[in-house]
Amino acid sequence: MRKYELILVFTSELDDASVQTEVSKVSDTIKAHHGTVVREEVWGRKQLAYRIHGREFGIYVYLVLEADHGVVAELERQLRINESVLRFLCVKKDKFAPDAVARPKMADDGAELEEPGIAEFSEDDESSQNARAS
């Protein structure tokens, strides 16, 4: 079996329960054809780079799956028919390619949490670095 990455863009009119229903339909199709879903992430409502069918926003879902080529062909056929799917892209994952980077977590107040291992410089640090450079 090969490993694939699948990105789905659903219409923004869907609520959370409908998105989960659509994702479970995709997962059921994969499992019915002897494939497995390794990873599933709902990235949420995002602005599209350009309008698709008059819509400016879409709900993004990321899946990693292990399946045969026949499963992918059937899955793509069903996604083309589904009217709630604006776009999709399924690519074979290279065995040396890293996993998709997890999105930064948001705090309750909407601010991004600091990434571990990334330190911010204060003004004192910048002035001391400038002094050393000159």
Image (cartoon, grey):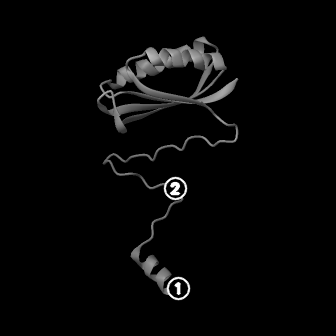
Q: Position of residue 105 (x, y in %)?
A: 43, 46
Between residue 29 and residue 85, name the one nearer to us: 85
Mark 2 residue crowding within 10 angstroms, few (<14) / some (14–19) / many (20+): few
Q: How many residues crowd around disc 1 within 10 Å: few (fewer than 14), some, or many (20 or more)? A: few
On residue 116, the disc is 2
User: Relative to 59, is 108 above or below?
Assistant: below
Any mark on residue 132, and which? 1
Q: Residue 64 sits in which quadrant?
A: top right
With respect to residue 122, does 113 lie above or below?
Answer: above
> Taking the image as drawn, is residue 25 in sight?
no
Q: Position of residue 53 (x, y in %)?
A: 32, 27
What's the residue type where badge 1 is placed? Answer: Arg
Task: Confirm or deny contact between disc 1 and disc 2 (CB under 8 A).
Answer: no
Residue type beneath disc 2: Pro
Left or right of 79? Residue 64 is right
Comparing 95 with 125, the one in front is 95
Taking depth in this image into account, of 6 and 34 the one nearest to the observer is: 6
